[in-house]
Image: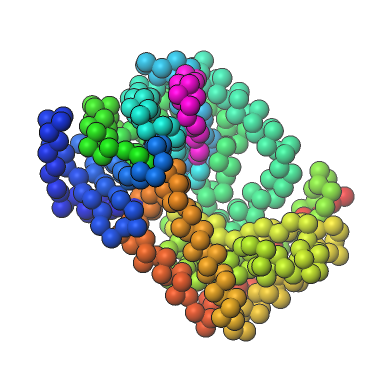
Amino acid sequence: MINKKFLVTVAFLHLALYGFLFAGQEIKNSPFAVTYFQLENGLNVILSEDYSLPVVSVMVAYKVGSINEQPGKTGLSYLLENLMFQGSRNVGRMQHISFIQRIGGTLSARTDREKTMFFQTVSSNQMATVLWLEADRMNSLSISYTRVEQAKKAIIEEIKQKKSRNLFQNSTLLFDKLLFSDYIYYHPIIGEESDIRNISLKDVLDFHSTYYCPNNAVICITGNIDKQKTIYLIRKYFQSIPAGKPVPPISHSSQTHELTGKTESITNPLVSTPGFFLGYRISPPYSRDYYTMSVIEYLLLKGESSRLYQRLAKKERTAHKIEGGIKKIRNRAIFSFFVTSTNNYTRNRSKKAILSELNKLKSTIVSENELTKAKNLLKTAYIKRYSTSLGKAFFLIEKFLNNKDVQTIQDELNKYLEVTPTRIIGIANRYFNEKSILINIEIK
């Protein structure tokens, strides 16, 4: 992300065609072109030109997610994502979708713990339409009792469908609760059904006015753009939108509860195979230890050559499914494993195998060949994240919202690639300890 500190250095570019001045900054030392600026109403803007294809991706992200919700009010951010397609001053219900599809574009939206994103990819000559649509709903979203109730009904039905599809949902929530310990980190992003039923029109209006405003948003446009024309259009459609009130700080406990290690068992009559969750708290995202843990993630879990895939799925065949890795939310991160097996015997063998591989990491030097293979997979995945216009928009939004400087992309990649075998031993011993959370999933 480009930090606001960059605004102290301002370059004034004269746009002769449109007859006004623009304050902005090109970001140097980046693997791709990036320009950042901020409108007077606080809207952050990131542009990145790429002329390889005649398409443009436009993403608007609001820095709000389930982490901003309070107990009893869960699901508000997910509900607002739904309402953002229900019409605004100049756009009817669901017309945003039909407009984009009519011009041959694709679109979607996503809400997670920390942000809500709306994104579309269209041919480059249709960018103005997308900007107009996004500005209209940012400025004049239609929120009424009827639309809120319709959205609530749709989300409650979605919650029921998710429960019927994801038979491990309750055990996943318990697992996250024990590892993260703070309610805002583990409650369902979609919300609790009882909370959704009790959300009022006032709740929605208050939440919307607080978080869905220019000074809590960033727009990222990537692809085949004329930068000066794009700047003009952004100012034309977004400059007049009033800034909102200052966004309140996130309410949560500043300290995580100390883990002492815990094992629990859950009987789930709906599943036909037993399994388990195993998790550890690790260092905060983007700390020095975090980069080493990311390499360990690739050694253990990423790709068919990874240790656990080879051992549990290929060699011993004790696991139906083996998933896991790093999960990060704001300044907290965990490292977890999720395994399902045929029966209790193979489940327990899978568990012992994982602990065995962790002990190997803690005591045995990783070979240069294995480490190189893991780093190459990591590097490929890292670069692939910004290999398309939409992927680049996701990448830049994440950098921005995590206070990461785009100038340090290569430096960040190097931090992964500089991890040494001895460093892996030290970090594995530090975090893969007895302070783990284990949840056994039993069947009737």
Q: Where is residue 284 in the image (x, y as percent from the top left)?
A: 46, 63
- Left or right, 207 with reference to 177: left
Instruction: Give the side of residue 421 with respect to residue 270, left or right.
Output: left
Taking 283 as reference, is 170 above or below it?
A: above
- Residue numbers of the magenta segment: 94-111
Tell me which residue sits at (33%, 33%) in the image. 213
* Residue 105 rendering spot, x and y as whole percentages: 47, 29
Which quadrant holds residue 28? bottom left
| Residue 85 seen in this snapshot | no
Total marks shown come to 0
**Colour logic:** rainbow
Residue 126's x, y, as percent?
37, 27
- Give the residue at x 48% y 75%: 419
Q: Is residue 411 left or right of residue 184?
A: left
Is residue 83 highlighted in magenta?
no
User: What residue appears at the point 42 percent right and 65 percent down from the top-left corner?
Assistant: 413
Q: Position of residue 256 (x, y in %)?
A: 50, 60
Q: In which quarter of the image is residue 211?
A: top left
Task: Say above or below: 283 vs 274.
Answer: below
Is residue 164 shown to the viewer in this render? yes
- Out of 324 and 211, give the one closest to the viewer: 324
* Picture layout, residue 273 above or below residue 119: below
At 71% across and 42% down in the image, what residue appears? 166
Q: Is residue 100 in the magenta section?
A: yes
Between 225 and 367, the one lying in front of the other is 225
The residue nearer to you, when weighing 238 against 161, is: 238
